[in-house]
Image (tube, helix red, strand yellow):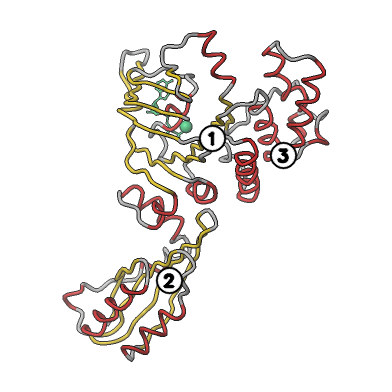
Amino acid sequence: MIKLENIHKTYVLDNHQKVEALKGIDLNINKGEIFGVIGLSGAGKSTLIRLINMLETPTEGRVIIDGEDITDYKEVKLRKVRKSIGMIFQQFNLLSSKTVFENVAFPLELDNTYSKEEIENRVTELLTMVGLEDKAEVYPAQLSGGQKQRVGIARALATNPKILLCDEATSALDPKTTSSILKLLCELRDKLSLTIVIITHQLEVIKECCDRVAVIDGGLISEMGNTMDLFANPQKDLTKRLVSAVVRKDLNDLLEYTKLEPEYFEGGKAWFELLFKGDKATDPVLVEVATLLNLKISIMGGQINHIQNEPLGIMVVAVEGSKQMIEKAFEEFQKRVYKVKLVGYAE
Ligand SMILES: Nc1ncnc2c1ncn2[C@@H]1O[C@H](COP(=O)(O)OP(=O)(O)OP(=O)(O)O)[C@@H](O)[C@H]1O
Ligand SMILES: [Mg+2]
């Protein structure tokens, strides 16, 4: 549905200084996919998403939408393509002097092909779809953030787009409202066969609803994959750092545990981090290894995340024994869990 080929974007500032925002992006986003793009501030996320609807033109490379190369399109043709690409923003960008109804009707009026009755029916249908049928005559100032974004979504979908672009669409919302907006996006994807691109710096957002993710760093894609793989098995340092802040959120203090260098370790306690994926139960693993090796295992902490409804669990356990027994325990854990890591020793 969306294909970016070798995209470069260089901004030239007033003082002729050049900013290379994107340095060669290749990306294929499939129809019906919810695709996430994550990265630190200034990585090039907004530039990337604005290239998809040609709000920015690439310095080099091609933008292909649903098989159509739109890179060289000018105003009239672009306007037509843009009707098939809706967009929502962090600050909602609603017109404050217009009611909710008028805001959603706006793109239809601009289009000049809809009758008054068609507009009325369509807006009512859209407001029902986003759960705001009773707010039609209200002004944006009288809405909560979540409600404003729902209006933004209704407006973005007015012209029946195939693609919905979301630039930090939930960044101004609290976690619960964020969740409800993401749920709505998922529903709309299914109902309308939309392809959705979500740009965010919050991994929580990716975790909840994206099928695939690209991590962008310094204008390049540094890592890309399906969401569970990225969370369970991140490759690059940046991804590891980002993922860790979410999947180990409750454990970070614990993992600050003073570490003894392994060469000084003769026996005592070793701390393991066990990673479980899917519905593999944790208890039998601990009991099995403890029984098999006649070891004491204590649970120090744990956390379970749901990546698109599939559990990814981390447990930190302390195992007591000789150096040799600790090594054996490592091997036995390795056979039973998705990943095991030795995170610390204590005498
Ligand atoms: N219109 C512009 N003119 C000049 N430089 C720009 C322009 N837009 C973006 N940049 C620069 O391009 C780089 C990427 O910016 P971009 O807005 O795409 O980052 P981002 O990943 O969206 O960041 P954030 O998370 O803060 O929104 C930055 O160095 C930025 O300063
Ligand atoms: Mg941005």
Q: Are marks 3 and 2 in contact (CB under 8 Å)?
A: no
The earlier-in-sequence mark between 2 and 1 is 1
The earlier-in-sequence mark between 3 and 1 is 3
Residue at image point 33% right, 69% down: 340
Residue at image point 68% right, 36% down: 150
Where 4 sits versus 37, above or below? Answer: above
Regarding mark 2 in the picture, which secondary structure is present there?
Answer: strand
Residue hosting label 2? 315
Where 263 sits versus 278, above or below? Answer: below
Under mark 2, the amino acid is Met
Residue hosting label 3? 144
Q: Which mark is residue 195?
A: 1
Q: Nearer the viewer, mark 3 or mark 2?
A: 2
Q: Are marks 2 and 1 in contact (CB under 8 Å)?
A: no
The earlier-in-sequence mark between 3 and 2 is 3
Residue 190: horizontal and vertical position, in percent?
61, 42
Regarding mark 3 in the picture, which secondary structure is present there?
Answer: loop
Residue 276: horizontal and vertical position, in percent?
42, 67
Regarding mark 1 in the picture, which secondary structure is present there?
Answer: strand
Ligand 1: give its quadrant. top left
Under mark 3, the amino acid is Ser
Number of labels in the image equals 3
